[in-house]
Amino acid sequence: MISRVEVQETNKMIREANLDVRTITMGISLLDCADSDIDKLNDKIYDKITKSAENLVKTGDEIGNEFGVPIVNKRISVTPIALIGSGCSASDYIKIAKTLDRAASEVGVNFIGGYSALVQKGSATGDKRLIESIPEALSVTERVCSSVNVGSTRNGINMDAVRQMGEIIKEMAFLTKDRGSIACAKFVVFCNAVEDNPFMAGAFHGVGEKERVINVGVSGPGVVKRALAEVRGADFETLCETVKKTAFKITRVGQLVAQEASKRLGVPFGIIDLSLAPTPAIGDSIAEIFHEMGLEHAGAPGTTAALAILNDNVKKGGVMASSYVGGLSGAFIPVSEDHGMIDAVRAGALSLEKLEAMTCVCSVGLDMLAIPGDTSAETISGIIADEMAIGMINSKTTAVRIIPVIGANVGETVEFGGLLGYAPIMSVNKFGCEAFIKRGGRIPAPIHSFKN
């Protein structure tokens, strides 16, 4: 039993170190909404989402106020829409996207995830039509988030889909060029996507999940940084133990919030995602943790080792605090959402290549990177292919959320606003990979995937 005394113990973390519950995400199955009539399909989707989540925002606010724990976001994830609208045309998918946006607006959540397709081994007709619709869908909606899973350790990498992802990203960048190519910030390409991720933009409600479920994502990089400041200069054993104990406390707060939300909403509790998710706020940065560990900047030699330490011990501490740790869980390294990462890019300490190396040991992958708008679709696909290979070979989730900002060049800055922050335009390797990407087909699964 978790007591409120445990939450009170964290009041100092909340006041002084930016501890928060980053999101309460309600997962909703839309499998029973499928219908050959597009109007009936949209009515079913709208009705189910608005009835299921009508009290989500209100309940989240009440819990936050009652326990004194900031709950930053309330969100919804739904069954991958390619599965629900498999018989739809591309124009019908746009109607579904608008329905999702309207439902999200009605219940007051800031994002709804699940405009998604799972094509790691190949694309069905519905997958293809949904993917073709993504640029328009994300450009005409405000709250809809999209993802495509193009690879897995078990199935290899669908390189036809990887090639198409570069083209899709370029198209959505162009369609929202007057808004900093913002549509790209709502789109993620995955390898080994998980079914219970509460974080956007990659959340969707997997087919193996219950009808409805509450998943909670906790945060707290500022809390970890403050704890490490108290053991500055200590050996690695002490450093690891400090991170682990701090992650335990952070996760216990999330566990209480999740259980309380589940009880009040009458929706089963799913998982706690104990990812350290930074924000643009000073003192809420993964890069600042690296600095406290002894690195001059994120990207300096030793950064990958520091991130591995952080990721591993966050998980070790979290799994002792909750029996249902899931989602992505670890440390996120988005550039635009972490002022320390932004400073490192500007100082020349952090490059795209170093970020790629860091993704071998972090929670996800290349996240919220802004690159020049004239970067070719093939180069973007090549970046995606590299990241998918890291995930496939290492049996971990990897992702790419990359933004070619139309009209912007290296060294300039693009503003996204809110939690999405702002980002310097990063340079991209100038050498081409067009012939490689145009090969097509599928990269087979690695030999260690055959474990049956």
Image (cartoon, helix red, strand yellow):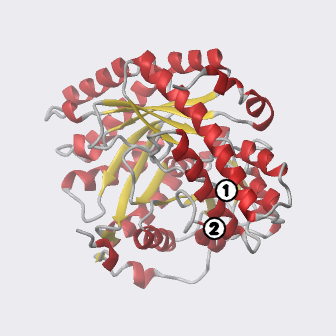
Question: Measured along the vertical axis of the image, is residue 165 above or below residue 59?
Answer: below
The residue pinned by badge 2 equals: 355
Residue drawn 52% across the image and 58% down it:
364
In terms of secondary structure, where does tag 2 sit?
Answer: helix
Mark 2 vs mark 1, CA separation in Å = 9 Å
Q: What residue is disc 1 on?
A: 335
Closer-to-camera residue (350/171): 350
Dots 2, 1 in contact, CB < 8 A: yes
Name above or below for residue 168 compared with residue 214.
Answer: below
223 with respect to 362 (left or right): right
* Residue at x-position 48% and y-position 82%: 433
Image coords of residue 186 (percent x, y): 50, 46
Q: Position of residue 84 (x, y in %)?
A: 23, 40
Say few, some or many: other residues with alpha carbon within 10 Å of mark 2 (under 14 / 14 to 19 / 20 or more).
many
Instruction: Point out residue 442 in the picture as x, y percentages from the top left corner.
Output: 29, 75
On the question of residue 298 being in view, the answer is yes
**Depth order, front residue of 229/286:** 229
Whether residue 230 is situated above or below residue 398 in the rendered picture: above
Q: Residue at x 76, y 60 (%)?
A: 290
Residue 396 picture quarter: bottom left
